[in-house]
Structure formats: C-alpha cells, structure tokens
Image: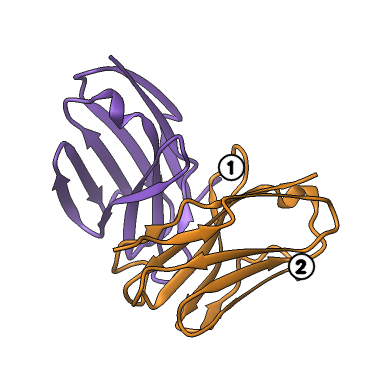
Amino acid sequence: KNEVEQSPQNLTAQEGEFITINCSYSVGISALHWLQQHPGGGIVSLFMLSSGKKKHGRLIATINIQEKHSSLHITASHPRDSAVYICAVSGGSEKLVFGKGTKLTVNP
Amino acid sequence: GAGVSQSPSNKVTEKGKDVELRCDPISGHTALYWYRQSLGQGLEFLIYFQGNSAPDKSGLPSDRFSAERTGGSVSTLTIQRTQQEDSAVYLCASSPRRGSYNSPLHFGNGTRLTVT
C-alpha cells in the first residue's frame, strides 16, 4: 500500500463545477504539499499546510491531521485548471513522499 | 527573477553511455532536491542538498547515480552506464531554507531522459 493515496485517479468536469480531490496518508507528517503539474510538465507548488485550511483565489486546501486526510477544492472550475494535481507529505525529513496524482480535465 | 533552470530539457542517449543533468536553483536558495518521474509513476525522491553537502542520498536507486553541488548553487546529477529503466523525467527543485516541511518548493521544468 502506498503511503500517500489520492482519489480519484482521473476526474472530468464541466466548466463552473466545484471540484474536490482527496489525499490520504498513512504516516505521521510535518507538512503536506499540493502541487500542480501542467501538460508541459512544469510543477507549481500550490499549498503547503500542516493544519487547518488555506485559500488562494479559487483554490482551497484543507487538512485533518487526526484523520490523516487532506482535500483540494477548486471552485468555479475553468479549462485552464486542467492539470495533474499531486499530493506530497513530509514526515519531518527532507524526503517528500508523493501520491500518484489526480488528472483533472475541465471541459468548456 | 529567474526560476529553477534545468538543462538539457531533453536528452536521448544510448544504453551504456554516461549522462550529466544540470540544475541551476533560484539564487540564494540553500536547499536543492532531485526527483525522478517515470512514465505512469509518481515522483520519487532521489537526493537532497543543503548547501554543498548531501545529508540525504537515500533515494539514489543505484551506485550508477551520483550528484554534486558546488558553490551552494549549481547541481549536477550524473548517471553512469545508463540503462533503459533510467528513462524518466528528472526534476530539480529548490527552497529558500532548510526543510521541505517548512517552505514551498520551486521546481524546474525537468530533463526528459530517454535511453535507447
């Protein structure tokens, strides 16, 4: 079993829909990262959080440490949100452990 | 300012040859990381530098892989006697201070390595 599990693996939505991507992990962590990888391959760090909730524009990330679970929400989705979203956790060392990613496609 | 720069962006090499992949981190970033993303697989950690030293090399898959960092800046990942299973995208990331757990990472666009 992977230490970091993401669901769903693939997600297709219509423009404007509210989207949720889930990440569950099995180890104790110091921080959880949400990353976005566009089709060209570049990776952008969206959020780094260790508790509670963070918001940036239409993106919201939450984490529940007790349940070892995090969600990434996208409100009013847009085709430019189409990308692979990756969850990664740090157990206090430098070695991030990554989920396999959720491929999001938002159709106009 | 400039982001993390990796070169080459693509590299095709024959099995058995050595390759060098370069990463120029953001100026002033003390932490530097190498990751690998194989087709259909998630990212995997290879090595971490703090300054010029590598406190964690645990992700290097074999002794054919080595990395160095000089001047607290540029890093080179070397793969000797490449094998087909080394084909992947090699990503570099940097961070302004110690700890992937207390600062966001800035990624380069990666080097796509194909071993034929």
Q: Kindly report the distance in space between the C-alpha atoms of the residues bearing marks 1 and 2.
A: 21 Å
Per the rendering, the colour in which chain A appears is purple
* Element assignment for label 2: loop
Per the rendering, the colour in which chain B appears is orange
Indicate which disc residue B64 carries.
2
* Element assignment for label 1: loop
For the residues tagged 1 and 2, is the chain the same? yes
Q: Marks 1 and 2: which is nearer the front?
A: 2
Q: Amino acid at mark 2?
A: Arg
Q: Where's residue A53, x and y in %?
A: 16, 50
- Front-most of B21 and A54? B21
Q: Where's residue A88, x and y in %?
A: 41, 52
* Residue at point 35%, 73% (across, down): B27
Q: Is residue B92 above or below residue A61?
A: below
Q: Chain of mark 2?
A: B
Q: Which residue is mark 1?
A: B41
Q: Where's residue A74, x and y in %?
A: 22, 33
Left or right of A80, for residue A88: right
- Front-most of A97 and B40? B40
Left or right of B17, for residue B24: left
Q: Amino acid at mark 1?
A: Gln
| Displayed quadrant of residue A57 | top left
Q: Where's residue A17, x and y in %?
A: 21, 20
Q: Chain of mark 1?
A: B
Tag 1 near tag 2, CB within 8 Å = no
* Residue at point 48%, 56% (across, down): A97
